[in-house]
Amino acid sequence: MVVRPLVALILVVILSAPVGAAGVEWRMRRPTPPRDANLLRRDMLDAHNRARGELGLAPLAWSPGLAVAAARHARELARRGRLFHAEQPAGRAGQGENLFSGTRGGYAYDEMVRYWLAERRQFRNAPSPRFSRTGRWQDAAHYVQIVWRDTTEVGCAMEPGQAEDFLVCRYSPRGEVRGRRAY
């Protein structure tokens, strides 16, 4: 019977596949998506402003200054090989920040931002930090920053690390202000 050898072959392939590190997805290799600063800017602004437009919110403008700050932190993430938020001053002086990491060369820019936008399923427009349907603010925080009404600017940068790409977007004014709704 042909089915048994086929099932055995599938099991061998699955069981011999490398296991990704904890917290990092493993993605089959495919051609690296196109990468350049203009494409990053276009894809990030398009995705952010499409989500905001669906809610009747004003579009974000690209900020070269925020992009420089994002690039600085993205380089540090790539150097250390792990995600962590940058230390920020308290209050309005700080910048909002969204982070993404994934298999090096495995994701196009628009795919990266879609992970943040997918958090909309967990979002409810309740005062911060109670904006998540799950009760865990982390489950909707990226989306909340994207659609925060008072945010007017965004700047992003991506830096390849040894095994992962690190995307950082910075926002001004920052969102997720305690006790306030996103919009």
Image: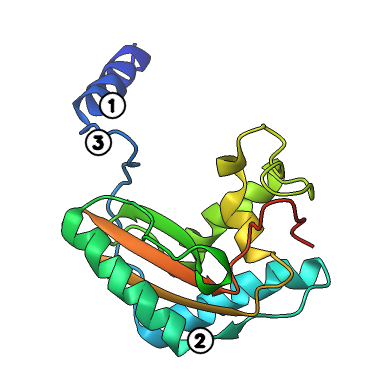
Identify the residue at image location x=65%, y=56%.
Answer: 144
> Amino acid type of disc 3?
Ala
Left or right: residue 40 compared with residue 5: right
Left or right: residue 99 compared with residue 71: right
Residue 95 in sight? yes
Q: Position of residue 111 (x, y in %)?
A: 49, 60
**Residue under pointer 3:** 21
Helix, strand or loop at disc 3?
A: loop
Residue 34 in sight? no
Instruction: Name which of mark 3 and mark 2 comes first in the sequence.
Output: 3
Looking at the rendered structure, the number of numbered marks drawn on it comes to: 3
Instruction: Check contact, mark 3 vs mark 2: CB within 8 A.
Output: no
Rendering quarter of residue 31 = bottom left
**Residue under pointer 2:** 63
Identify the residue at image location x=50%, y=62%.
Answer: 90
Helix, strand or loop at disc 2?
A: loop
Instruction: Name which of mark 2 and mark 1 comes first in the sequence.
Output: 1
**Image quadrant for the N terminus?**
top left
Q: Position of residue 141 (x, y in %)?
A: 59, 50
**Image quadrant for the C terminus?**
bottom right
Residue sitting nearer the eye, 105 or 40: 40
Residue sitting nearer the eye, 22 or 35: 22
Q: Position of residue 18 (x, y in %)?
A: 20, 33
